[in-house]
Image (cartoon, helix red, strand yellow):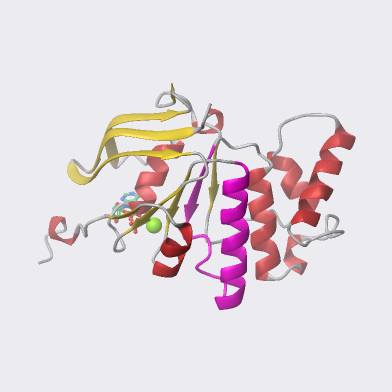
Amino acid sequence: MQSSLHIKNLTLYQQGQLLLKLNEQVNGGDILTIMGPSGSGKSSLLNWLTGTLGNDFSAKGEVCLNGQNINNLPAHLRHIGVLYQDALLFSHLTVAGNIAFAMPKGEKKQRKQKIEQALEQVGLAGLGERHPDNLSGGQQARVALLRMLLSDPKAILLDEPFSKLDTQLRVDTRKLVFDLIREYKLPAIMVTHDINDAEAAQGKIITLQSQDHLKGNS
Ligand code: ADP
Ligand code: MG
């Protein structure tokens, strides 16, 4: 069965004011792009999907992952992987330790092998015992990517994941992330300000409206 992330009739409110409405299905291997000005609700949408929406917000609607309603599941049981603009690696753990932290339990040797293979796949062969602080920004981004992928997610959310990388690194990292999303056939939603990211994703683009008129400062 093809995997899918289905957002059914979502209405999201911040302090009782309408923030956004959305009704979308993303199939495995597809990347839905969300654009829109700062404050339009992009991160809040992702927080709703992961089950981490703040107290200021309320929502109506359903989210189904592979046909299962996950609305009432806590964040750690939703199996949704998120990648942010900062790698957010633990500096007291090694590269391998960071990746292992998020992996499902299993036999130690097999886990180690899986990590080594994954590091090799993204050009980081042999760096497992290093500490993240000694890696370049691009290398850290790839470790964060592997940590997310090896946690065995059923869907992937990307919140401006490439915005801190400079041009060539950005293009390369983006290609790597998109290739892996397609290889694993996972549904993905990407928030970005960069039209080049949106075009590279080759999927539908939704632009959220500015909410400045709600702020009473016009
Ligand atoms: P975007 O990611 O598109 O910049 P956000 O989803 O972060 O937008 O913000 C949507 C609205 O919610 C904005 O008005 C913002 O000020 C507000 N907001 C964001 N985070 C919080 C929070 N933790 N508590 C209260 N309000 C928030
Ligand atoms: Mg945001």
**Residue 52 in view:** no
Residue nearest the observer in this picture, 67 or 109: 67
Instruction: From the viewer's perspective, tell me whether residue 164 is left or right of residue 22.
Output: right
Residue at screen point 64% across, 53% down? 145
Does residue 180 belong to the magenta stretch?
yes
Q: In which quarter of the image is residue 89?
A: bottom right
Report the residue that reaches farthest toward the right: 109
Residue 31 screen position, x and y as percent: 46, 49
Does residue 86 belong to the magenta stretch?
no
Residue nearest the observer in this picture, 127 or 174: 174
Residue 201 in the image: above or below residue 56: below
Instruction: From the viewer's perspective, tell me whether residue 109 is left or right of residue 121.
Output: right
Residue 6 in the image: above or below residue 190: above
Residue nearest the observer in this picture, 216 or 138: 138
Residue 45 screen position, x and y as percent: 35, 45
Residue at screen point 46% across, 34% down? 4
Q: Give the range drawn in magenta.
A: 155-184
Q: How many labels does the image show?
A: 0
Q: In which quarter of the image is residue 193?
A: bottom left
